[in-house]
């Protein structure tokens, strides 16, 4: 890898969760969300890859630490896998499998968290990447239902009939609300110009805003350098896998992605 033999880019920022001052104990899901925000904020772009940190040091108050520590090593591994899964969905590269560390910090108030990130190619994670049998055996299956992020994603090809199930975008908020755009090809361009497959009448949408495409029998959204960004289920994304039922927001327009049953 020609990036660096050992990168130690440390970025730290204080995040106050969206509670009032009378905040309660930290919840594990809140730590997970802030880890993803930290990953996205500290991504580094090279010639052919987008790198994200592989070391996440989470500092919390002693009170919160005593709660989170009770979950044990399994909790930290679960967080690391979550970071890896979310980064992989967007096509990001980790120098090694990510690691999450937790420690108490007396200067931090309960309900707050300080996350320090690092790029370090010498770190060895104590967990393995589980191969997804569904991806590997796609060609062997006639119809597969896979659970991803608690959302059922349908494989859109049926080997038996050879018929492809069409994906479609439905506008659920914005101009032309209720209109459905069927995606007949393996890629569609969405934006404000007539050349786009899905033309959006929204001044906050870029001329070529994002593309929707198939890769390995799965649908992805990729932002095309838009001014206001592309959001999937409220998360700003560069490249992200989408499942039936997911909501895609661009400008003031909100789409729902779906696949024919």
Image: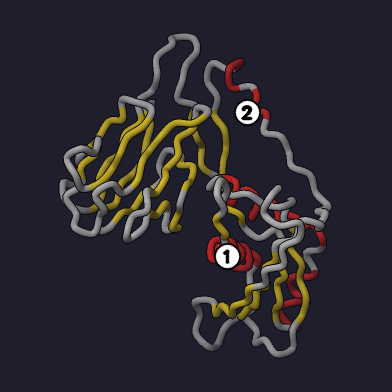
Q: Is residue 76 visible?
A: no
* Left or right of residue 169, residue 38 in this image: right
Q: Identify the residue under disc 2.
A: 134
Q: Earlier in the sequence, mark 1 or mark 2?
A: 1
Q: Is residue 44 above or below residue 163?
A: below
Mark 1 touches mark 2? (CB < 8 Å): no
Q: Residue at x 71, y 34 (%)?
A: 131
Question: Label for residue 240?
Answer: none
Expressed as whole percent of the image width and height from the top left, the position of residue 179 reads: 20, 40
Q: Is residue 152 visible?
A: yes
Instruction: Report the label total.
Output: 2
The image quadrant that residue 9 belongs to is bottom right
Question: Label for residue 42?
Answer: 1
Expressed as whole percent of the image width and height from the top left, the position of residue 203 reads: 19, 58
Nearer to me, 258 or 220:
220
Q: Secondary structure at mark 1?
A: loop
């Amino acid at each position: 890898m020609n990036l660096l033999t050992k990168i130690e880019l440390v970025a730290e920022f204080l995040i106050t969760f969206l509670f009032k001052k009378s905040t309660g104990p930290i919840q594990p899901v809140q730590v997970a969300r802030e880890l993803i925000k930290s990953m996205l904020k500290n991504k580094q772009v090279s010639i052919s890859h987008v790198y994200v940190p592989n070391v996440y040091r989470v500092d919390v108050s002693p009170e919160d630490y005593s709660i989170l520590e009770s979950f044990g090593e399994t909790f930290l591994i679960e967080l690391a896998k979550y970071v890896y899964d979310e980064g992989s969905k967007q096509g990001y590269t980790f120098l090694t499998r990510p690691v999450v560390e937790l420690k108490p910090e007396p200067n931090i108030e309960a309900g707050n968290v300080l996350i320090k990130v690092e790029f370090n190619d010498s770190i060895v994670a104590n967990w393995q990447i589980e191969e997804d049998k569904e991806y590997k055996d796609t060609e062997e299956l006639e119809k597969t239902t896979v659970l991803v992020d608690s959302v059922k994603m349908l494989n859109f090809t049926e080997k038996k009939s050879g018929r492809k199930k069409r994906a479609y975008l439905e506008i659920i908020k914005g101009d032309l609300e209720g209109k459905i755009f069927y995606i007949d090809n393996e890629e569609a361009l969405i934006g404000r110009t007539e050349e786009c497959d899905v033309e959006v009448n929204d001044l906050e949408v870029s001329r070529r805003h994002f593309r929707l495409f198939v890769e390995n029998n799965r649908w992805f959204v990729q932002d095309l350098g838009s001014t206001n960004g592309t959001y999937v289920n409220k998360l700003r994304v560069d490249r992200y896998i989408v499942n039936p039922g997911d909501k895609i927001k661009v400008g003031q327009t909100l789409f729902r992605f779906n696949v024919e049953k």
